[in-house]
Each structure stands twice: as C-alpha cells, then as structure tokens.
Image: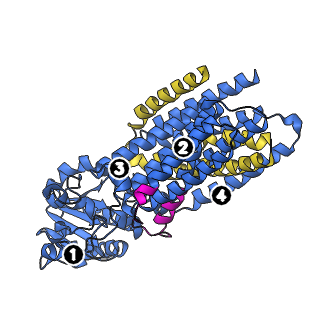
Amino acid sequence: MEALVIALTVFVLAMFVGFEVITKVPPTLHTPLTSGSNAVSGITIVGAILSAGLQLTTLTTVLGFLAVVFATVNVVGGFLVTDRMLRMFRRK
Amino acid sequence: MRLALVNLAYIAASVLFILTFKGLSHPRTAVRANLMGSGGMLIAVVATLTLLDWSQGIRRYWVIAAGLVVGVGVGAVLALRIRMTAMPQMVALLNGFGGGASALVAGAALLEALAQGRMPPTQFTVATTASGLIGAVTFWGSLVACGKLQEVLPGRPVLFAGQKAVNALLLAVSVGLGAWLVLHPDAAWTYWLIVAVGSALGVSSVMRIGGADMPVVICLLNSYSGLAACATGFVLDNNMLIIAGSLVGASGLILTQIMCRAMNRSLANVLFGGVGAEVVTGAGADEVYAGRVKSASADEIAMVLASARRVVIVPGYGMAVSQAQHAVRDLANLLESRGAEVEFGVHPVAGRMPGHMNVLLAEADIPYEKVREMDAINPTFAQTDAAIVIGANDVVNPVARTDPKSPIAGMPILDVDKARTVIVIKRSLSPGFAGIANPLFAADNTLMYFADGKKAVLDLVDALKQTA
C-alpha cells in the first residue's frame, strides 16, 4: 500500500511537471514534440529487457522478445526521426 | 547496493527526459534536447542490463540482443527513409509500437509472477488491466490511423449501425474483465481477453474518424502510448516508467486540447461525431459560386505579385500532397529578391498532424522566424497585398465567422479574405473536409488558379520571372 502511495505521488507530480514544461513548446515544434515524446514512451523497453532476460517460461520469453523489438523500434525510430526534423529547423 | 545504483541511474534518466521536453521550447536548443533524451534512454537500458543475473548463461543475452538488433534495424530504416510529407503515418506507427510493447511487458510480468508462485497484489492487477487495455487500443488504433493516412484504408469515417453502443459495450466488457482479474489474479486468461477486447475497441473507434480529424487522433494515441508506459510502471513498481509515461501522457493531452480548440469542437465530437462521413454536395455551392468565381492565368497572377509589397503564403494539406514545399520556397525567394516581404501563416490543424506544415517548410529551408502562428499573422492581413492559399480550404473559410449555423461556425480561421488580393491555388472547387462551399473562392478580391499545387507554384515562378 505504501509503495502504491509513493508511485501515485510520483505520477501526479510528473504530470504537473509535464504540463508546465510542455505548454512552453511552440507550435512550430509540435511535430518533433510528438515524435520525440513518442520515443520517450519507449522507456517500457526496460521492462521488455527484464522479461526477455529472465526467461521464466517460453511464453514470457517470446512476449519479452516481441516487446524488446517493438520498444526498440519506437525508441530508435522516434529519436532518429526527431533528430532529422530538428536539424532542418536549425539550418540557417 | 547494485539495485540502489540502478535506481540512481533511473533518476538520472528521468531528469534527462524532463530536460528533453524543456529543451524543445526553442528550435535552437531542441537538437541537444533530443540527444539528451536518447542519452537518458541509453543510461536506462544499460542500467537495466546490469540487473540481469549473467551467471545463468549467455543464452539470456541472445534473446535481448536479437530483439535490439531487429528493433534498431527497423527503427533506423523507417526513420532515415521516411519522407517528411509522410511524417503523420510514421508517428502513428511508432505510437502503436510503444503501446504494444507496454501491453506485452505487462502481460509477461503477470505470467512471470504466477510462474514464480507469487499472487499479484491489487495494484499489480489494476495496472496490468490498464496497460493491456490502453496498450491494445493504442496498437490497433494506431495501425488503423496509419492505414488511413497512407490511404490503404478509406480516409472517410467508416460508420455502422450501433457503433457507439458496440464501443461502449467493448469498454464495459474490458472493465468487467479487469475487475475479474483483480478478484482472481491467477486467472491469466482474462488478461488475453482484455487485450482482445481492447484491440477490437481500438479498430472500431478509429475507423469512425475522418482524415482531417487525424491531428487529434495522433495526439490522443500519443498520449495513450505514454499512459500505457505509465501503467506498466505501476505494474513493475518502476518510478522512471511512471515519470516518462506521465510526461508523454501530458504532452499528448495538451496537443489534443490545442487541436480541438483550433477546430472549435469538443473531443467527444471528434471521437464520436463521425464528421466528414458524407460530403454535403452542393449545399449552396451553386448559389455561392455561380458566375462569381474568377479563374486567372499564371501571367495575370504574376502581375499582381510583381507589384505586391507584402505577401503571406498559407499552406494546407494540399501542399503536402503535391510535395510543393520546395517550389514554394523558390517562389518566396523570388518575391523577396524583388523587394517584397514574405511571411507564412499556418493554421494549427493544417495538415494531418500538429506542426506538419512547419516541418515541411523547414525541410525546404524556409527560416522558422518567417512562419507565423494564426494569432500572430491574422492582424497583418489587412496590410497584406497578396495572400496565396495553397491547398487549404476550411481553415480559410470566412463562413466560420459569419454563419452561426455552419458546421465550422466559431472555428478560428486565417483571415486571408482581408488581404487586398487573395490567390487560391486549388485543383477544383470541391469542398474541404467540412463539406461546405467556401465564399472566399467567389469573393471580389479572389483569383483562383486551378492546378496541382506544385505545378501551379512552378508556373507562377516562371511567369513572375518573365515580368519585368
């Protein structure tokens, strides 16, 4: 129960930080914001790595492997494409 | 001790993620911000790898490595080869992968707990339900959105009788299944049913949303992918996942709100309205257009532009479709070399995702300082000699201001009609997404140029070069 309260505290505070910081992003960068935040949501990759590495049952290993693939596509694709876009804004 | 070090690394990664969003507040700092985000991700991954017990054999390593290699390969190829005009599809697809991964991780965690003979506590099962449901909706909803944007699936809303009731039922069933899982944590099959029901809900709810409402859908799915990661954080008791997921969830929600406000519609209306299902053909089109539309030649328009001191270019989805951004840049440069002041006005929902037009203009090397937001550019139209509208329709329709009964009544628009001359480049008089006629096209100060966007702009550049 105590762990849940701590987790909820972190959740609520992080949401507030998110709202404060993200409302300052100008509309011109809204596409990179979407793709970049998308890459951040690939953080679930850490859970995927644990499942793929723990290999408790065949099923969890398969799920872990698939999750690693999905999350890695998300992370690598997201950060790379965001970088491509942002460099276009920086030229000149 | 090792766990404490890993958790410290997770805090560092969380801080880097917050700085990522902070740095995106200006184009100058944004590249570095994105690098900080990827650095945070690298720290998190490396720290997690040290948590594994390597003494149990190298075999564990191979599954992870194989997954990483496949993921890096697919992700890099997608990211480096995608055209800027196809960015909405790309982002939709990535949203889907993120949501899918979170759902898979939560499912694997449930099965692992049961295999180890641990009875998952309530926090665990509630969060697993949330992750499975949100993740499945995100995955399938994103695939449908991607298919619509790529025009593999019909772009118009796909409606069927009782659709709302079916969706409500699917949602109720998934919540019921979640309650069952909370009461019977050892019934892993309920998790798979939740994922199946969530998948059906994702497909059914996005199928009914039309192409021009995609900016809202992409923002919402973006938010969902963050919330799914957040829920997975509650499953794994991992604060870094909760922080990163919340940031993404907040970002998606803010953008969703901005998009809805820019269309003067509620989120419920976008999600459940089925707007754009029927084209309201000829609803007053003849009365509005008959005998009043002036179609001009490239030379006539060049004459107008040649004497213009201030020109504002308003791009819409049509510019993206015809890949006209580079031609537009040439036109802008030519006008500037003749002494005119050129700026760009972008409506928040122009294109198929927020900021889509800005990326295309940046791709064509147009400095971002010249690309102005709606509220900044609108007061300047009265002092503008020529406004050039390229492939936009509803976002420049003055009916939004004048007719309270119109479907777009109250929607904020770009006031191009206040410019001295309005030049509209468009393939035909066909209505936009809202399905209504646009009196701007028949206005006294409007010249229509009927052609594909890119060809039209190239024609204008040629004609302008001929003008002394």
Type of the residue with mark 4? Val
A87 sits left or right of B421 in the view? right
Q: Which residues are magenta?
A: B140-166
**Chain ID, mark 2:** B
**What is chain A's hue in the picture?**
yellow
Query: Looking at the image, is mark 1 or mark 3 nearer the viewer?
Result: 3
Q: Amino acid at mark 1?
A: Gly
Q: Which residue is mark 3?
A: B268
B55 and B455: which one is in front?
B55
CB within 8 Å, label 1 to label 2: no
**Residue B8 placed where, x, y %?**
66, 24
Q: Residue type at mark 2? A: Gly
**Distance between the alpha carbons at the discs numbered 1 and 2:** 47 Å
The chain letter of the blue chain reads: B
Which quarter of the figure is the C terminus of chain B placed in? Answer: bottom left
On the question of residue B387 being in view, the answer is yes
- Residue B81 at what x, y percent from top left? 58, 62
Tag 1's secondary structure? loop
State the residue position of label 4: B74
| 3 and 2 marks on the same chain | yes
Q: Is residue B378 magenta?
A: no
Dot placed on the residue nearer the N-terminal end, 4 or 1: 4
Residue B455 appears at what percent x and percent y? Answer: 35, 76
In front: mark 4 or mark 1?
A: 1
Q: Gap between marks 3 and 4, in whole Å? A: 35 Å
* Residue assigned mark 2: B176
